Image (tube, helix red, strand yellow):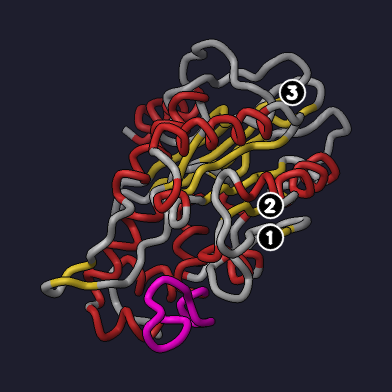
Amino acid sequence: MVKSIAVIIVGSLVGTAVGQAAVWGQCGGTGWTGPTTCASGSTCVYSNEWYSQCIPGTQTTAVVTASKTTTKSTTTATATKTTAAGTAAPSAASFILAGDSTVTNDKGWGGAFCSVVSSVTCTNFAHSGTTTVTFKSLGDWSKLITAVKAAPKPCYVLIQFGHNDQKVLSQSEFQTNLQNMGNEIKGISGAVPVFVTSLSRRGFSSGKVSDSLEAWMVYTRNAANAIGVKYIELLQTSIGYLNGIGETAAHKMDYESGDSTHLNSCGADVFARMVGDLLVRKPVVAQGSIKMDSTKTGKIDAKQAIC
């Protein structure tokens, strides 16, 4: 029985190749149904049972083993993947952030996020008041592109806009701008664009979050799907959490009294953890790229107030 189950697990880990994953793309993991072989010049490197990634280097033979006991459905899986030099590929990644004030170091979740990543570098270019248009016209985007090219790879570029765009742009313009940003990042070897739907505001009506960003969330998803990149659902996840903890607890994360858009330090920590967990769970990044905090994650999942 154990042997037959092990065979099933190995099959789910290895899978049947459907095309090839691009360099730095996902190539394996429990439940993964996409490509399990990599583009020429890269190797499928095991990170954890949920995630393997195509890392540049000569293709080598993988040894994958799996076992499962019948007690409490506990599953373990191990694998050995090496690069051409025979050394394990690093699971850490570089992160670069783009966004408006809700992503900045002083009023958003960006600075706190950089403290929860196990990265070579984490740089935040978020700029208060910007849109997908002004982030470029003010020069922030060109600085970001220079940093992405120089950053250790893989480099994940998290892009969150919408709060200010909804005031001045049509939704189709917003989607086109996001797609152009994503495609430019995709054109840099080893860079991975990741769209982030907007952080919810903390206005309430009849005991529930009242927010006007849902349509912009849809266009963020559309942009990601149109150019074949991943996104994480921060808006709906943050709304669910805020509804769970209630209005009084939600306002304890306000930047200052009356400001239900921006975050104080405790609020920044909460939503930075949420972003990190979403990136791992999708999965977008290897689990080793994010420092785990099971206590805080557990409270967020249970919709318990932290601040």
Labelled pair 3, 2 in contact (Cβ < 8 Å): no
Labelled pair 1, 3 in contact (Cβ < 8 Å): no
Of all residues, the one furthest to the top in this rendering is 19
Question: Which label is found at residue 124?
Answer: 1
Residue 247 lies in what quarter of the image?
A: bottom left
Residue 222 visible within the image: yes
Labelled pair 1, 2 in contact (Cβ < 8 Å): yes
* Closest to the observer, 283 or 175: 175
Q: Quadrant of the C terminus?
A: bottom left
Q: Residue at x 63, y 71 (%)?
A: 105
Dot 1 lies on which element? Answer: strand
Q: What kind of residue is marked 1?
A: Asn
- Which label's residue is closer to the chain start, 1 or 2? 2
Instruction: Look at mark 3 in the image and give the residue it sits on.
Output: 42
Residue 92, how many percent across, how many down?
Answer: 70, 51
Question: Which label is found at residue 232?
Answer: none
Which portion, as a residue range, is magenta?
254-268
Residue 88 visible within the image: no
Question: Which label is found at residue 96?
Answer: 2
